[in-house]
Image: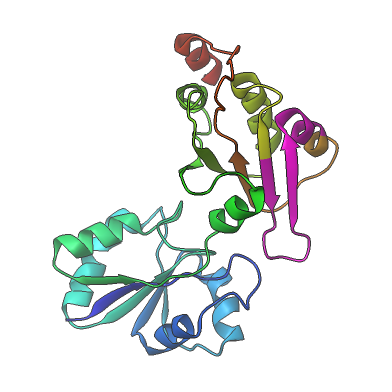
C-alpha cells in the first residue's frame, strides 16, 4: 500500500520549507497541486522533477476516490497547496477523509501556515484562540460576526485585500471601534506589514492605501466588563447580506 503525504509549502519566502518536505516531494510518485503553475515555480527552485497533477476545489469531488484507490494500489502521493498547509482554508479535507475511510495511511508534515505567525505577532493571548478562516462572502457573513460578539478568545480570520475594508467596517459595527486588532499581510515577503491598533485605527489606515497580498486579521476577544452596544437582530443582518 502507498501513502498520502500532506506537505506544507512556503507562504512567501521560498526558504521556509523543511529539508524533509523537499525529500518527500522528490521521492513520491506524484504531487497533487492546487495550481500547477504556482507550484512549478517552487519545484523548479528545489530541482524537484516529480510528476505534477492538478487537485483543487473545482475538481476534488470527482477525483478523491480515484486518487485514494491509486494509493491503495501502491503509489505514494503528496498533496500541496499554493501556499501553507493543505486543508487549512485550502483543498485537502475531502481527500484526507476519503483516504482514511479506505484505510489509506495519511501523514501531515509540520510546516508553514499563515495564521501562526500572524497570531504570535499580534501580541494577543495565544494559549486559547479560534480560527474562523474566510468569512462567508455574502449570505451568512453578518450572522457569523454576530455569533462571535461574545467570544472571549482571540479570533483569527483570513480575508482578501478586496474585502479588507469591508471586514474592518463590519468589525467596528459588531465589536466596537476600540476593540484591538492586528492586520498582517504579505507575511514572510519583502513588503510584509503587521498593523496593530484599534479597529477604528486599522480602518483609517487601510482606507488610505491600496492593499495587496493575502490578509490575516487577528481580533482581540471580548474583555471582562466590556459592554457590546452593537447587538443587532440577525434577521436584519441577513437582509443586509442579500
Q: Is residue 7 above or below residue 217?
A: below
Q: Is residue 115 above or below residue 198?
A: below
Residue found at the far front of this picture: 224
Q: In this view, does 207 lie above or below 140?
A: below
Residue at image position (53%, 33%) is 137
Q: Is residue 162 magenta?
A: no
- Residue 46 position in % (x across, y down): 57, 87
Image quarter of residue 64:
bottom left
- Residue 92 position in % (x across, y down): 36, 59
Image quarter of residue 83:
bottom right
Q: Which of 33 and 96 is in front in this view?
A: 96
The magenta span reads: 182-204
- Residue 18 position in % (x across, y down): 51, 80
Q: How many marks?
A: 0
Q: Left or right of 118: which side holds 109?
A: left
- Residue 32 position in % (x across, y down): 40, 71
Q: Nearer the viewer, residue 153 or 236?
A: 153
Q: Left or right of 112: which side holds 182?
A: right
Residue at image position (55%, 33%) is 221
> Is residue 73 something one can see in this rendering?
yes
Q: Is residue 190 above or below residue 229?
A: below
Q: Does the magenta stretch include residue 192?
A: yes
Image quarter of residue 44:
bottom right
Amino acid at each position: 500500500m502507498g501513502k498520502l503525504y500532506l506537505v506544507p509549502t512556503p507562504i512567501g519566502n521560498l526558504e521556509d520549507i523543511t529539508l524533509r518536505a523537499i525529500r518527500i516531494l522528490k521521492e513520491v510518485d506524484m504531487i497533487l497541486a492546487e495550481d500547477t503553475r504556482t507550484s512549478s515555480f517552487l519545484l523548479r527552485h528545489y530541482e524537484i522533477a516529480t510528476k505534477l497533477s492538478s487537485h483543487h476545489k473545482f475538481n476534488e469531488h470527482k477525483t478523491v476516490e480515484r486518487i485514494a484507490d491509486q494509493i491503495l494500489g501502491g503509489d505514494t502521493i503528496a498533496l500541496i497547496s499554493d501556499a501553507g498547509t493543505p486543508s487549512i482554508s485550502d483543498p485537502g479535507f475531502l481527500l484526507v477523509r476519503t483516504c482514511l475511510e479506505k484505510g489509506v495511511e495519511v501523514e501531515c508534515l509540520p510546516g508553514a501556515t499563515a495564521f501562526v505567525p500572524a497570531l504570535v505577532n499580534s501580541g494577543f493571548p495565544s494559549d486559547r484562540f479560534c480560527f474562523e478562516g474566510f468569512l462567508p462572502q455574502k449570505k451568512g457573513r453578518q450572522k457569523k460576526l454576530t455569533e462571535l460578539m461574545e467570544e472571549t478568545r482571540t479570533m483569527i480570520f483570513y480575508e482578501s485585500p478586496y474585502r479588507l475594508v469591508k471586514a474592518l467596517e463590519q468589525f467596528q459595527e459588531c465589536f466596537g471601534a476600540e476593540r484591538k486588532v492586528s492586520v498582517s499581510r504579505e507575511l514572510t515577503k519583502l513588503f510584509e506589514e503587521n498593523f496593530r491598533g484599534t479597529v477604528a485605527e486599522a480602518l483609517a489606515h487601510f482606507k488610505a492605501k491600496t492593499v495587496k497580498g493575502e490578509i490575516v486579521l487577528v481580533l482581540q476577544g471580548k474583555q471582562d466588563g466590556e459592554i457590546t452596544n452593537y447587538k443587532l437582530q440577525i434577521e436584519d443582518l441577513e437582509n443586509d447580506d442579500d
